[in-house]
Amino acid sequence: MNRGMLLKLENLVQFHGACCQLHSLCCSQAPRTQRKLLPSSTYPGGAAQLGPSHWQRDTFISAALLQYRLLATKKGKGPKTEKLSPVKPKQEKQEVEIWLKMTVAELADAMDKDIDHVYEALLHTDVDLDSLEPDSVLNEASIKDVVKKCGMKFKWAKLKEEKVRENKDAVKRPPADAASLVPRSPVVTIMGHVDHGKTTLLDQLRETQVAAMEAGGITQHIGAFHVHLPSGEKITFLDTPGHAAFSAIRARGAHVTDIVILVVAAEDGVMNQTIESIHHAKSAKVPIILAINKCDKPEADPERVKRELLAHDVICEEYGGDVQSVKISALKGENLMELAEATVALAEVMELKADPKGLVEGTVIESRTDKGKGPVTTAIIQRGTLKNGCVLVAGNSWAKVRLMYDENGRALKAAAPSMPVQIVGWRELPSAGDEILEVESEQRAHEVVEWRRYTEGQKKLEQDMEVIEAKQKEHRESYKKGLEGLEGLTWRQRKRAQYKANKQLMATRPKERMESDSLTYPVIIKGDVDGSVEAILSVIDTYDADNQCELDLVHFGVGDVSENDVSLAETFKGTVYGFNVHAHKAIQQLATKKGIEIKLHNIIYRLIDDLKDGLSSKLPPAVEENVIGEAIVLATFDVTIGKKKVPVAGCRVQKGHLDKKLKFKLCRHGDIIWEGSLTSLKHHKNDVQSVKTGVECGLSLDKEMEFMVGDEIICYEEKEISQKISWDPGF
């Protein structure tokens, strides 16, 4: 029994006693004859009672109070009562930590206020509220003003010392001692204009038929070959494509080579890619050997080739320079040994040597995805000896070498300096031109790749910040320009005025977006090797007709067309272009089902032409006016039709014929004053459908126009013609 129940019981007993006393008092004052005793059966054991006696009531109360005191004093503790803690009012933040270059959102969080509170504090300052966004940066004075106007104090936040991340990148070893160097084979790059016989020259040197296997008879990606000469010498040749699209591949070939053989056709002379090859060789500081090809042709003029090269600072020995020149015929195999001897002699003069020991260094020449082997790279080893099990890093990829092959697909156990080798075991496909470095372990390879990705992310972040700052600057300038004439208004009035001014523009935005979407051509590019994709992308970079149709490069990659490519094309409503790759039957069926076009090519300029046609197909047809006939007004008169006077022109057809079904123009002094159709065409008061040259006729227009003698009537028809995209990729 708790304290509350005892108090209620005590009050109830006292109230009952008071009622009994009042009842007894009333009964004592009534006449005796009116008193009625209760039957004895109601109170067994005695006479009737009107209420409890005083001693009974006091005894009951005393017992109840005794029980309460006993419970209250039990264990020496009083009854437990729950007390509610008083609600304390929230105390506002009195001190705010600030720092330089705080944004509006950061200042609001530091003050424990919402962003609107900051805006209100900046109302009567020089800050332009309309240009402020939650991520806008405030200057130091504005930050202090906001804090002070909010009745707070500020303190400078402690600068957090950012831990400088340790550089984990892999680098080349220092140059080796001259005593540890051994002679190596020269790496020779054959360069020149397309179709000047570069690949045919290599075919003769290694007695193969690579040119016959090349699509269209042109080399479309770099090839690395190891050639054994009859004299016992070994030369590593790099065959680079001569097409204009493969400029980056030629540049890469020049930078990993020791000697450049410049092939020039004797009947064509110096061409565009010949000049470009010379520039690549000079920028790489590589010596040149001139091979004048096709000297067996009647129209060949080797001396003209030498004279033309003088203008590009390529001076042959016959003209007092240091460039060896050899007249050859790659098709017939004439003087090829002289060219090889000239190459070996130049290599001996250069004293080419390399360190065959230690960690491997090399360069990725080409990379591709093989269906059974995964990512595969063709590389030139420049230092060390590559063996199975070596851990390599190239770009943002690493590999543990599982297998090695030569250019003919034969397995190799080791690859010494100057050897071209195909490497299997890459986790991801590196890019052509990446530097290959060997590291001690897989853990070290992970560290290097992670560091390189981190540095790339930091560079991208810096670039993004520059773009953001430029956008903010552009926004501020456009905002200030829009405020011209609104200086005397409050910021709310300015906002209202700007909204009204831009209301019409805002209403047209959805329509503009739909129009831009209809003039976008999304594409997915897939190539057989990294260099081919690089060449196609370099051509796409020259696209400059976005005002006609926007070229949207959705995705590019190396390997056959996959289901993911088809899904991307479906999502973006694009087209898949493949170069030297395949699309399996299941992929083609899936693409057909989803309405996706897959266009496969094995010659790059045909792929680009197809891409141009696809872009042109997005353009709306142009309307061309074809003049059918011309007539001159000789007289004018009015004809009454009902209650209406209709002006009529009497004409003579000067050229062609007039056809009532076609459209007409009314020209006066060279200006077009009306366009439309005829309501009537008559000859000798007869309605006719057409009037030929030299015939006079009368005609009326679908609009009341006052004719004048000498006006010209031109009959024409409109014809829709397909437009062509104005993009010249240089082919």
Image (spheres, grey):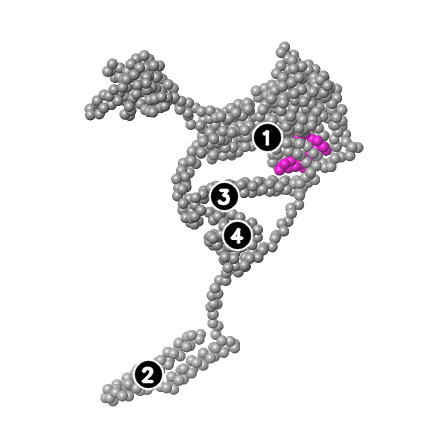
Q: Which residue is mark 4?
A: 142
Q: Is residue 158 above or below residue 3?
A: above
The residue that mark 3 highlights is: 476
Mark found first going from the N terminus, 4 or 1: 4
Residue 105 in the image, given as x and y percentages of width and height? 51, 51
Query: In whole angstroms, how far apart are the C-alphas of marks 1 and 3?
Result: 43 Å
Residue 287, labelled with which disc?
Answer: none
Magenta part of the chain: 377-399
Nearer to us in this view, 671 or 226: 671
Q: Return the residue nearer the eye: 166 or 273.
A: 273
Q: Which residue is mark 2?
A: 20
Looking at the image, is mark 4 or mark 2 earlier in the sequence? Answer: 2
- Mark 1 sits on what residue? 530
**Separation of disc 3 and disc 2 at Cα?**
93 Å
Q: Secondary structure at mark 2?
A: helix
Q: Nearer the viewer, mark 1 or mark 3?
A: 3
Relative to 488, say whether 625 is above or below.
above
**Along the line of sight, which residue is nearer the eye, 659 or 21?**
659
Q: Is residue 688 visible?
A: no
Give the crowd class for mark 4: few <14, some 14-19, many >=20 residues within 10 Å.
some
